[in-house]
Amino acid sequence: MSFKLKSKDKIVTAFSKIFRRDKLKTDDPHLEENDTVDNEDQNNTENNEENENNNNNTAKNRLPFQNELPAAMKNISKGCSSSSNSNKLNFKTIQVKRLMKELADIEKFKQASMTPPFTVELVNDKLDEWHVKVLTSSIDSSSELYVDLKKLTIPHILLHIEFPASFPFLPPFIRVISPSIEKGFVMEGGALCLELLTPRGWSSAYSIESVIMQFTASVVKGHGRVSKTIGKSKSFSKKTAEEAFRNLVRTHDKYGWVTPPLADG
């Protein structure tokens, strides 16, 4: 009997503990939840601090690049203008390489010739602007132009050549500076009436050496003469030459190229 009572007391005590724990939960249902939230907040705080430290370390690592990127990306933010600037840079690089090659080829040609037909000098050391002296000795000796040059003791025909930034994809602008020449496909201001010097007639495969030799042949073929009225005629100026050449291009773009009679030059 005593054993049964003791066992009963143990069972009651156990149930009392269970009910007391359940009562605590029932009386304050947020107690356990608050404990969980506190634990979560603590964990979140620790995680945030850790993330903040990681972010700070990352930011420190990026600072040098952040200082450099705006300058490096400045052109990109401009949209189309950056593409335009890039194209200009590419064209300039191509132009420089091609002009260096042209000069090297001309130098080889000069060394291989006993009497070179022309010489080249850079204007103010600018690679894209040349003075070319076509020597009188290279002009056909049976031509009237040659006779005029010899009679007036003119040693050469001076040409001025300017290369656009997009050379060799666009032609150079060539004009005669001196002497003043009539006919021979030489227009006002010294501009040249040659199809190969127009955007439509030009090919990037043409060398400057071949262009100069073409001028030498054309000025003779067109019966060029040294002007006998130098004092009365318009001087060969760049502005006049450019205007005459623009008119030439517009006319031929509209009507096409027709080879004039030799007498018309």
Image (tube, rainbow, N blue to C red):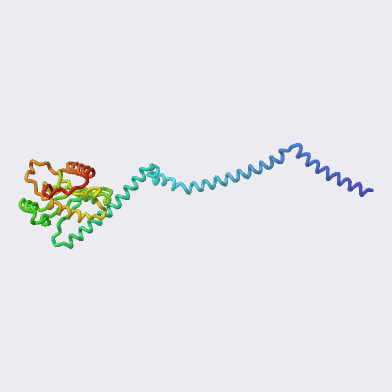
Vertical position of residue 109 compared to residue 151: above or below: below
Q: Nearer the viewer, residue 252 or 104?
A: 252
139 horizontally vs 256: left or right: left
Where in the figure is residue 67, as x and y percent of width and height?
42, 45
Q: Residue furthest right?
A: 1
Residue 9, how many percent across, how many down?
88, 45
Q: Is residue 11 found left or right of 231 in the rendered image? A: right
x%, y% of residue 223? 10, 50
Residue at point 94% right, 48% down? 1
Q: In the displayed structure, does residue 26 sit left or right of residue 165? A: right
Nearest to the observer: residue 90 or residue 216: 216
Rendered residue at 23%/48% (across/down): 198
Relative placement, left or right, of 30 versus 226 is right
**Residue 102 falls in which quadrant of the image?**
bottom left
Indicate the position of residue 35 as horizontal and vertical percent values: 69, 41
Residue drawn at x 50%, y 48% is: 58
Image mark count: 0
Foreground of the two, 134 or 50: 134
Q: In the current view of this chain or complex, which residue is farthest to the top? A: 27
User: In the image shown, does 190 or 112 lie closer to the viewer?
Assistant: 190
Q: Residue at x 89, y 46 (%)?
A: 8
